[in-house]
Image: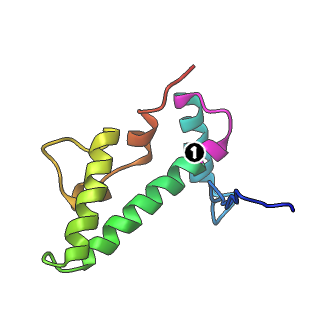
Amino acid sequence: MVTCAHHRNYRLTFSTPRRPYERERLDQELRICGEYGLRNKREIWRVQLVLAKIRKAARELLTLEETDPRRIFQGAAIIRRMTRLGLISEEDKKLDSILELSTSKLMDRRLQT
């Protein structure tokens, strides 16, 4: 009797750009690769996807009313997660501050070897 106890859902950790040969984006990605010592552009795209998911969740919560229990509970959770990661400061605990995050803010936390 063979059992398969552990399933793993593989998902994409990055998303490629919509326009593959956009000059300004290519120049910016090359500058970021050099500045942060990245191996390839996939690492940039991975950070951008993580940031896009976080900002999308914050935007969705901002559309709800302030008294909505979902906004209160999930908003506090996402703010707590961002402060724990060191992306937003202790004084600036608002959902609006999550929308102001940039890829450079996430990349600054990266350890370089």
**Magenta region, residue range:** 36-44
Does 102 appear above or below 36? below
> What residue is shown with label 1?
44
Question: Residue at position x 58%, y 30% from top?
Answer: 34
Of all residues, the one furthest to the right in this rendering is: 1
Q: Nearer the viewer, residue 2 or 58?
A: 2
Residue 4 drawn at (x, y percent):
77, 60
Q: Is residue 74 left or right of residue 28?
A: left
Q: Amino acid at mark 1?
A: Ile
Secondary structure of the residue carrying tag 1 is helix
Residue 9 image point, x, y percent = 67, 61
Where is residue 57? Give x, y as percent. Answer: 37, 67
Q: Residue at x 31, y 57 (%)?
A: 78
Q: Is residue 73 above or below residue 46?
A: below
Quadrant where the image shows the C terminus = top right
Name the foreground residue: 70 vs 113. 70
Q: Is residue 40 magenta?
A: yes
Q: Is residue 76 left or right of residue 60?
A: left
Tell me what residue is drawn at x 13 percent, y 77 percent.
67
The quarter of the image holding the N terminus is bottom right
Q: Is residue 76 left or right of residue 49?
A: left
Is residue 45 inside the magenta stretch? no
Residue 80 left/right relative to 44: left
Image quadrant in which you'd find residue 64: bottom left
Q: Residues within 10 Å of mark 1 (few under 14, many from 20)?
A: many
